[in-house]
Structure formats: structure tokens, C-alpha cells
Amino acid sequence: MHTVLLSVKKNYTKRDGTTPIYLEYYFSREKRKLIKTGKYIEPQYWNNDLREVRRSHQLHKELNSYLKTLKHKMERIVDDSILKGVSPTLSYVEDQFYLRTSPEKKQTLSFFERFEEFIETKRSQVVKDVVKDYNSLSKHLKGFEEKSKKSIMFGDINEKFYDQFVHYLEYVVKKPKGEIGMQKSTVGKLIKNLKVFLNYCMRNGTIQPIDLSAFKVLNSKATDIYISEKELEDMHELDLSDNKLFEEIRDLFIIGCETGLRYSDLSRLSKEHISDKFIRITMKKTLDNVVIPISQRLRSLLEKHTNNLPLCIPSHQFNKHIKTIGKLADIKEYQTKIKVIGNKKIPESKMKYHFISSHTCRRSFCTNQFLKGMPSILIRKISGHSDERSFLQYIKIDEEQAAQQMLDRWLEIENT
């Protein structure tokens, strides 16, 4: 497809109210690259239909002339590469553009300028939640830079940098509610995305190779809860007819427990995804297609709502109300969750309903199906887990349940 356009991000402005003007190169419909032109304007002066600065801007002639020159240069780079039999990939065109327009620019881009370009490149390739994770990493890197009072440079990224950044995340970061330090699993996610960014830069040849062997992706054993079959039935039978909002949220929660869908998929489930015996949907996070059999309890809820799914609200509101519904359903046994922050294990004991959230649906589906004796390969096909290791983190059974499951299997074998 090989298209070159001019564009701005109207939803992103600097403190002075201006936004960058980009060259937007499409290698294909799915792969694109944004390259700064070095020019900024107020968003209201950009004509997105004509892809140029509006005439109401006092420097529109000069700016448009300059921008068109850059656009023509990039188009010539693409055309020349095709004539030479070279594939005009994103990294190739970017390299050639910088070499022809500003040979020193390629080497002088700052760490965060590179990170911003990385996010813009990935924006069309990954789901919004992943972009949010990249932006979160950028925020914490800037916080680390401010705390250390030293600019982050690619040449300084080594094992010492890793140790200092991890220490900052585990013992220094102040969370929105005032708590200090992140859980080990959250730190691991940030390190994982940092490695994605650094490997991206190395593959493109924009930075010198960095040894990332010491960049361990930390993790900790999850102690999250699941809702048992009996608790699900208690919630299902709960009379909420006097509170329509709670009834809708309860029904949506149970549908989540019967399908194993993430909230991002559950919130967009519609009658178009539902057939006679199955739900067919493409998962937003992984783009994998899944086919989910409709259980008897799920069928009753779908019929209740005539295949129009219950009201869907923002996840933070859902998480708040589902705890109250869990309390009303008498899900009150005490549970202890272990938070791992740095080298400390912090137990947190509360009644079980306090720990219910939207993600409890997915864990409950996997665990309940496993306890019913369903082979893990079948559950994974429906839940969309790509490997056994990540799937097993969703199986929430304790020692007593494991022993009982084994005893039941022995009895089945002896009686056959």
C-alpha cells in the first residue's frame, strides 16, 4: 500500500496548546510509522480533510510548503527503494529519511522521543489496553528519572539501571491511594514492556545492542479468589427485583463466570455473537476467535434478557457494586490474599466478597470447569489461554480440593 500522509494528534497537545505535525507512513494497512516533522500548530489550524495547515494560520504558506517538501522526500525514498528491489519497511524508510534530511537527528533523539515514536507505531498494531500499559511505563520511567535526578540515556541502560528502576518501583512509587511500592507482578509487567521497547529499538538498529539477560520479569504466585458453583447459584437466586442496576450487574457477572470472557469482551457481547448452542467472538486483547458453549444457567440468563446483554458500566463501577452484591449473597467467609511488595509478603484478610471483581469471572470459569473434570486443553480453547503455564495461574484450588479431586478420580477408576 506504501502511502505517505501528513497528520496531527488533535487529542495530544503540549502546555503551549500546540500539537506536533507528523509524516505518517503506511507500509501496509496494519503497519505504520509516525515521524515528527519538527513543526507544531494549534489543532484548530489543521485541516484534516486536505492534510494541510488552514489558511487562517498566518504562516500557512511557509508551513505547507515545508511540509509538502518533506512529504515528497519520503515518497521518493519509497519509490527509490522499490526500484532498487528493496522492501520499503518502516525502519528502512525512517532511517533513509533521517539520513537525507538530518543525518545527526537519528542519533540525537532522546530516550523519551524514541519511546513516544514506539507508542505511536504500536498504536495501530495492539489493543488500547496495551497502549495504556506502554503509557504507564513511560510515566513511571519519567518518575524514576525525576527521582534519580539524571536523564535516562540508552547508553546507561544496564544491570545497574535495572536494579535501581526495580527498587524504585517496589519501594518508592506512591500509588493513587497513598500506598508506597508496587506488587511484584505489576513490576514484572512494567519490566516486560520495557524489554519490548528496547528490543524494538535494537531490531530497528536505532540503538546499539544492550545486554538484557539480567532484566528478569518478576512474578509472584497469585492468591486471587474464585466464586464456587454454590456461591454462583446463591447469587443467581438472589432477589434483586427492587434494584434494577444490581440485578443487571449480577446477571452480567454470572454471564462472565459462565463464559470466561475478559470484561473488555463481556462489555461488548451482543446478540450477533450468539447462536443456537454457542457464543462466537473475537477476543479484543489477543484477536483470537473463541467458541463458547452455552450452559443451562447461561441460557436462562440470555433468555431473560432476550439475547440483549445486561447493562454494561465502566469496570471500576462494576467492581464497586459487585462486592455489595456478593455481600447480599452471603459470600462472607474470610479469605487471605498475599501482596508481595519488594521482599515483603503482606497478608490481607477480609470477607471474600471484598475481593470480588470483574476478573473474578475468568478465574471462576476456569476453576469451576477444572473441578468438574473438564480437560485443561478444552478449557483453554474456550478461555483463549495460549499456554498451560498462564492457564494454571487461573486454577484456584487449595490442598483440600486437590486431595478430594484425586480421591474422586481413584474411585472412578476403581468402579470402571
Image (cartoon, rainbow, N blue to C red):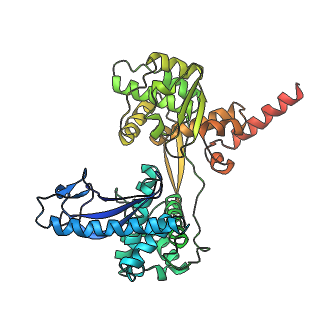
Residue 53: quarter of image: bottom left
240 lies above or below 324: above
Q: Please name whichever residue, 96 or 277, is drawn nearer the observer in this view of the structure.
A: 96
**Which x, y percent locates residue 249?**
41, 29
Give the x, y percent position of residue 270: 45, 27
| Label total for image | 0
Give the quadrant of residue 324: top left
Quarter occupied by residue 216: bottom right
Instruction: Please indicate, yes or no, whether residue 173 appears anywhere in the rendered image.
Output: no
Relative depth, front residue between 21 and 70: 70
Q: Image point 48% across, 16% down: which residue? A: 303
Look at the image and tell me in which quarter the C terminus lies: top right
User: For the view shown, which residue lies furthest in the front direction?
Assistant: 83
Q: Where is residue 133 in the image (x, y as percent from the top left)?
A: 44, 57
Q: Which residue is drawn at 29% across and 57% down?
A: 9
Where 274 falls versus 391 (above or below)? above
For the question of whether residue 200 can be seen, the reply is yes
Q: Position of residue 236 (x, y in %)?
A: 50, 22
Task: Using the image as rendered, state which of residue 159 and residue 242 is in the foreground.
Answer: 159
Residue closer to the observer: 326 or 386: 386
Residue beneath the point at 57% across and 71% down: 215
